[in-house]
Image (cartoon, rainbow, N blue to C red):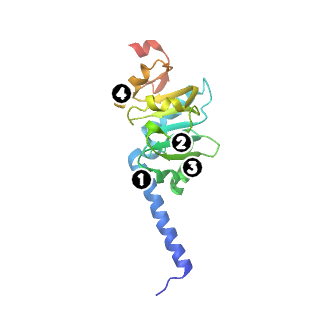
Amino acid sequence: MKRTTSESQQATRKKQKKVNKTELNKYMRSYHGCDDIHLQVFRKAKEFLEQKTAVQQVLYPGCHRHLTASLVFEDVTYLDCDQKVGTVFSDPAALDWISENKLYDASPSLTFVCGSYTDAKVPKSQFSLAISLSAGFVSPHCMKHVAPGGYLLVNDCHWDARTAFVDPQLELVGWWDSSTSQFSSNWMSFLC
């Protein structure tokens, strides 16, 4: 029996919906959506940094499928060497989920670049914030993409925060205080 065009189109749409849900589900399984532990850190980082300057464009090297940054930041360029994770960033179900849960009024802007952060094909001196979470030694390779006066949000997985801390071109302006769930610039609490 030959399928009609409409049956073929319906089958294609069903297949796309299944793929879309699968891509969003991969993110949800890894990061738990709005329960992602990084969501609060991203929110508080934005509040903390915007006391100093507006966060315009964000670079997230070694992002994997971590869409959560787009819930807080309007314009995020995601960079990862695993081509398989790139599909989540253009997935209609994932984009709808971001639009429904974002914490800002503007339309979200997401760009995925497949490549290594060691030789990233992204503009230099363009981003106001780079995010380095558990992806290795990101800061030595990616700070050239951050505009003068921009920031690095980094954890110490793979010692990247320590690497950034001793970089003479960078200045520590704050850190996450897990006892208060806030960013702090109180040097006494940092040193004690």
Residue shown at 59% from the left, 36% from the top: 57
Amino acid under disc 1: Lys
Count how many numbered circles sit on residues in the image.
4
Amino acid under disc 3: Glu
Residue farthest left in this picture: 158
Q: Which residue is mark 3?
A: 100
Q: What is the x, y in percent for residue 18?
A: 45, 63
Which numbered disc, 4 or 1, marks the residue that appears first in the sequence? 1
Q: What is the x, y in percent for residue 72?
A: 55, 38
Q: Which residue is mark 4?
A: 159
Q: What is the x, y in percent for residue 88?
A: 47, 52
Q: What separation in Å lies between label 2 and label 4 (alpha carbons)? A: 23 Å
Residue farthest bottom in this picture: 1
Q: Is residue 21 above or below residue 141?
A: below
Q: What separation in Å lies between label 1 and label 3 (alpha carbons)? A: 25 Å
Check contact, mark 2 vs mark 4: CB within 8 A.
no
Label 3 Cα crowd, 10 Å radius (few <14 / some 14-19 / many 20+): few
Which numbered disc, 2 or 1, marks the residue that appears first in the sequence? 2
Q: Which residue is mark 2?
A: 77
Q: Is residue 46 above or below residue 86?
A: above
Q: In terms of secondary structure, where does tag 1 sit? A: helix
Q: What separation in Å lies between label 3 and label 2 (alpha carbons)? A: 20 Å
Q: Quadrant of the C terminus?
A: top left
Which numbered disc, 3 or 4, marks the residue that appears first in the sequence? 3
